[in-house]
Amino acid sequence: MLVLAIVAYALFSRTMRYFEVSEKAAMTLTVLAVEQGVRVRFAMAAMKQSPAPSDRWQETNPFEFARAVPPNYLGELGAGTDLRELKPGNWFYDRDRHEIAYLPRLASRFRSEPDAAIPIIRFRVEKRGATSTLPSLVQVGSYLWEPEYATF
């Protein structure tokens, strides 16, 4: 019975780490898709194949602007939203901060600022440097999320 319990724990532990690695990969791919969508929209406007982005593009929801809305998108949320009540594993747009944010579901190896009440990863659309013509999705704040393929 003890051997069976140890084997079950090892399988469960390994499986949860694989799920966490895949969640982080999915989050990263979503960020890349949104950034690519934003850049394509700006490039097309520069080639005059689409209307120019408004001057207030930094205040526009990047998901809608890039036309890259993930299936786990909760929508636009405002100041009155209690983030602790939101379901982890979802994206949202923070209207007040003009940022997209992700709430990790499996965050056993996630570390962020000490004053953060819940695990959250935020990104903002910005142009890097004075010579940059295309914006990028820039991480806001710092975090460390290192799910690993560790052995038992």
Image (cartoon, grey):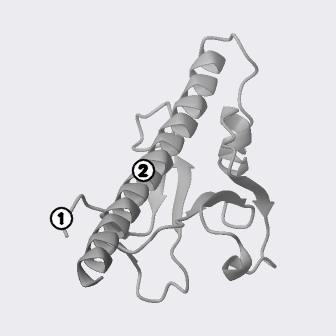
- Is residue 27 toward the left or the right of residue 15 in the image? right
Determine the image quadrant of residue 69.
top right
Q: Farthest residue to the front: give it.
A: 1
Determine the image quadrant of residue 4.
bottom left
- Is residue 122 toward the left or the right of residue 49 in the image? left
Label 1 sits on what residue type?
Answer: Thr
The residue nearer to you, when weighing 46 against 12, is 12
User: Eyeballing the image, is 85 above or below 53?
Assistant: below
Q: Residue 22 shows which numbered tag?
A: 2
Label 2 sits on what residue type?
Answer: Ser
Query: How many numbered callouts?
Result: 2
- Distance of mark 2 from mark 1, alpha carbons? 17 Å
User: What residue did someone put label 1 on?
Assistant: 151
Residue 103 x, y percent position in the rendering? 57, 66
The residue nearer to you, when weighing 108 against 9, is 9
Badge 1 element? loop
- Is residue 29 toward the left or the right of residue 100 in the image? left
